Image: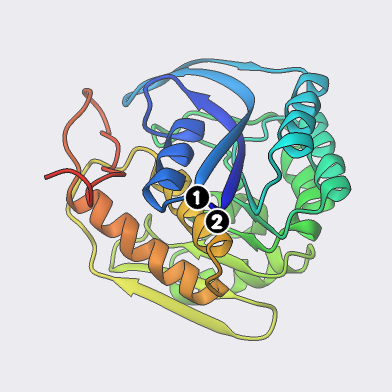
Amino acid sequence: MIKKCLTIAGSDCSGGAGIQADLKAFSAHGCYGASVITSVVAENTSRVISVFNLPASEIEKQIDAVFEDIGIDAVKLGMLPTAEIIEAVAERLKRYKPAFIVCDPVLTATSGDSLSESGTVSAFRKHIFPIADLVTPNIPEAEIIGGLNIHSAEDMNTAAKRIAESGAKAVLIKGGHLLDDARDILYNGEEFCEFITARVDSQNTHGTGCTLSSAITANLALGHGLRESIKLAKDYITEAIGNSYTVGKGHSPVHHFYKLWS
């Protein structure tokens, strides 16, 4: 039977990030993808034009619609732009108890534009991290959530520990914003594990964080362990960047279906 993954995130009308990237990543891994839209974002590869957040009550109804009919093996959380939305999503997930929850705490877009309101970090800590199997912040997000500047692998370790103190079972700090190799660090509450690949020289990085976390979610749904899911997802995103094509005038998206296209 096909594995089913749900993304609860914002919609990117340009197709490179958010819900659209998540669904592409699920499909590329052979999983069925369902979606709950939290925010309609008018953005492209260069900038965010506007953000329209849906009422929490409508987000709750979308979650109910998916779980009461389809059933879900793993959930990926992306853009949860307000404290009210975060609390509503957490309440529903506690009710339905999916086997896996991966949280990518989206605070800014690749362009640098903010995608969240004040109060979201504390709401993530209180409501989402304690129910998450994995939290996957990038360097800027980890700096905000962890309350420190990150310039080295040691700083990444410190940030991961601080975020884990909020209750997350595991934290993956994505090191793509550092200047050396593409190094991600996993902390499971007891030990650290590094995932290192050569950095791909490309500006086509729109939606990389969304895609990586969704790929991890899909691999968990498929039955892989956490470390193996991260390794497989990291190999996937590296190839998706390396095989990307140019769309738009800014940071083009990755190529989610590079394995299927000649």
Instruction: Answer whether residue 155 is visible to the viewer in this image.
Output: no
Residue situated furthest front in the rendering:
1
Question: Residue 181 vs residue 48: left or right?
Answer: left
Figure disc tally: 2
The residue sitting at 83% across, 21% down in the picture is: 57
Instruction: Answer whether residue 81 is visible to the viewer in this image.
Output: yes
Type of the residue with mark 1 = Ser
Q: Position of residue 14 (x, y in %)?
A: 37, 22
Q: Position of residue 20 (x, y in %)?
A: 45, 31
Q: Which residue is mark 1?
A: 214
Image vertical order of residue 217 relative to residue 255, above or below: below
Q: Mark 1 and mark 2: span between their CA atoms?
A: 5 Å
* The C terminus: image quadrant: top left
| Rendering quarter of residue 24 | top left
Q: Position of residue 38 (x, y in %)?
A: 66, 26
Question: Residue 189 vs residue 180: left or right?
Answer: right
The residue sitting at 52% across, 25% down in the picture is: 11
Q: Which residue is mark 2?
A: 217
Type of the residue with mark 2 = Thr
- Pointer 1 and pointer 2: residues touching (CB < 8 Å)? yes
- The residue closer to the viewer here, 54 or 28, is 28
Image vertical order of residue 32 relative to residue 193, above or below: above
